[in-house]
Image (cartoon, rainbow, N blue to C red):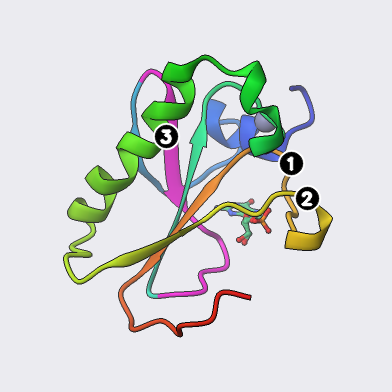
């Protein structure tokens, strides 16, 4: 997608603090962290949100999920972490490229919304 912020980040056209990459997945630090560790995991294929899951190969989606515990381990999140994927306006999704937030490094509240 030409004008997608996260596609540009993934291609290196916009700088980011990369924490992980493989053939299917790119992960980088959130510019406005909401926890001591706040990382975004994105598929390299442009998908607007989880609502586009049927447009992705299983591998493209599963690699995002498989990357999460690898990244969590490399960030020393052995005491736990939270994974969030905002989907659409009610969830305040602000960047329309599927992404999974990894939040950790602190004790989080029990409420999620
Ligand atoms: P959403 O609100 O769509 O779930 O999450 C989008 C996230 O992208 C936000 O947490 C926001 O801080 C982050 N973000 C927006 N623009 C940039 C950017 O240019 N670089 C990085 N690293 N993160 C960004
Ligand atoms: Zn994109």
Place of residue 7 in the rendered image (x, y in percent of width and height, measured from the top left): 63, 30
Say which quadrant the C terminus sits in: bottom right
Q: Residue furthest top?
A: 57
> Is residue 47 positioned above or below 36 on the image?
above
User: What residue lies at 56% left-to-right and 74% top-to-bottom?
Assistant: 112
On whether residue 31 falls in the magenta region, the answer is yes
> Is residue 84 positioned above or below 20 on the image?
below
> Is residue 11 positioned above or below 86 on the image?
above
Disc 2 on helix, strand or loop?
A: loop
Q: Is the magenta stretch mostly helix, strand or loop?
A: loop
Place of residue 60 in the rendered image (x, y in percent of width and height, measured from the top left): 47, 21
Q: Residues within 10 Å of mark 2 (few under 14, many from 20)?
A: some
Residues at marks 2 and 3, CA–CA distance in whole angstroms? 19 Å
Place of residue 20 in the rendered image (x, y in percent of width and height, measured from the top left): 33, 39
Q: Residues within 10 Å of mark 1 (few under 14, many from 20)?
A: some
User: What residue lies at 45% left-to-right and 85% top-to-bottom?
Assistant: 109
The quarter of the image that holds ligand 1 is: bottom right
Give the side of residue 14 with respect to residue 20, left or right: right
User: What residue lies at 44% left-to-right and 75% top-to-bottom?
Assistant: 35
The answer to whether mark 3 is within 8 Å of ligand 2 is no
Report the magenta residues as a range.
Answer: 23-35
- Which tag, 1 or 2, sits closer to the chain's start? 2
Q: Read off the residue under disc 1.
A: 96
Q: Do the residues labelled 1 and 2 touch (CB within 8 Å)?
A: no
Q: Read off the residue under disc 3.
A: 64
Q: Read off the residue under disc 2.
A: 88
Q: Do the residues labelled 1 and 3 touch (CB within 8 Å)?
A: no
The answer to whether mark 1 is within 8 Å of ligand 2 is yes
Say which quadrant the N terminus sits in: top right
């Amino acid at each position: 997608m030409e004008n997608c912020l996260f596609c540009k980040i993934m291609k290196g056209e916009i700088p980011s603090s990369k924490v992980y990459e493989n053939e299917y997945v790119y992960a980088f630090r959130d510019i406005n962290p909401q926890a001591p560790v706040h990382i975004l995991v994105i598929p390299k294929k442009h998908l607007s949100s989880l609502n586009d899951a049927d447009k992705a190969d299983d591998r493209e989606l599963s690699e995002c999920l498989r990357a999460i515990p690898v990244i969590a381990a490399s960030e020393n999140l052995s005491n736990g972490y939270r994974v969030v994927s905002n989907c659409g306006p009610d969830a305040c999704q602000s960047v329309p490229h599927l992404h999974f937030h990894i939040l950790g490094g602190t004790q989080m509240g029990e409420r999620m919304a």
